[in-house]
Amino acid sequence: MQLKVKYLFPETEELRTRAGDSGYDLRAAIKEPLVIDPHGRTTVGTGIAVEVATEMNIDLELQVRPRSGHTVKGIVAQFGTIDASYRGEIQITLFNFSSQPVTIEPNERIAQLVVCPIFKPEIVTAKELTPTERGTRGFGSTGKD
């Protein structure tokens, strides 16, 4: 399997990960520091476009995930899916859930990119579903009798 990376922003660092890490660091492709107001949001380019190629005949998606180091400070990258057919720049929406302005520096790590398999089962129309102990009990019902 290969992840082809096209660098669109001259200052973008090479996409890499450490052994054992599940994702690749995505960085802010900005020339100047960017302030996100309290309870505000902004979309930031990463300076890369990608193509994920496989020889194993498995459908793949790319997932954007928040960085735990930012969530502690109140900054959360919007979780999202990037379809394998997308060839544009990866952009990340960042939310500032804190009551203080937060500054994002040029080339700062802002999110993670994870490659995931996609399973597409055959869809079968059913008049009834197999009953379970939980049944139709929804939000907050687990563990309650």
Image (cartoon, rainbow, N blue to C red):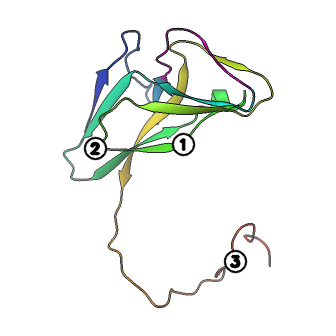
Q: Mark 3 — residue?
A: 137
Asked whether 29 falls inside the magenta stretch, the response is yes
Amino acid type, mark 2: Ser
Binning the other alpha carbons within 10 Å of mark 2 as few (below 14), some (14 to 19) or many (20 upward) gives few
Amino acid type, mark 1: Phe
Amino acid type, mark 3: Arg
Q: Mark 2 — residue?
A: 85
- Percent position of residue 80, x then y: 49, 44
Q: What is the C-alpha distance between the residues marked 2 and 1?
A: 18 Å
On the question of residue 82 being in view, the answer is yes
Q: What is the C-alpha distance between the residues marked 3 and 2?
A: 38 Å
Q: Nearer the viewer, mark 3 or mark 2?
A: 2
Asked whether 62 falls inside the magenta stretch, the response is no
Please tell me which residue lies in front, 66 or 31.
Answer: 31
Please tell me which residue lies in front, 85 or 122.
Answer: 85
Q: What is the C-alpha distance between the residues marked 1 and 3?
A: 27 Å
Binning the other alpha carbons within 10 Å of mark 1 as few (below 14), some (14 to 19) or many (20 upward) gives some
Relative to 91, does residue 134 appear above or below in the rendering?
A: below
Q: Quadrant of the N terminus?
A: top left
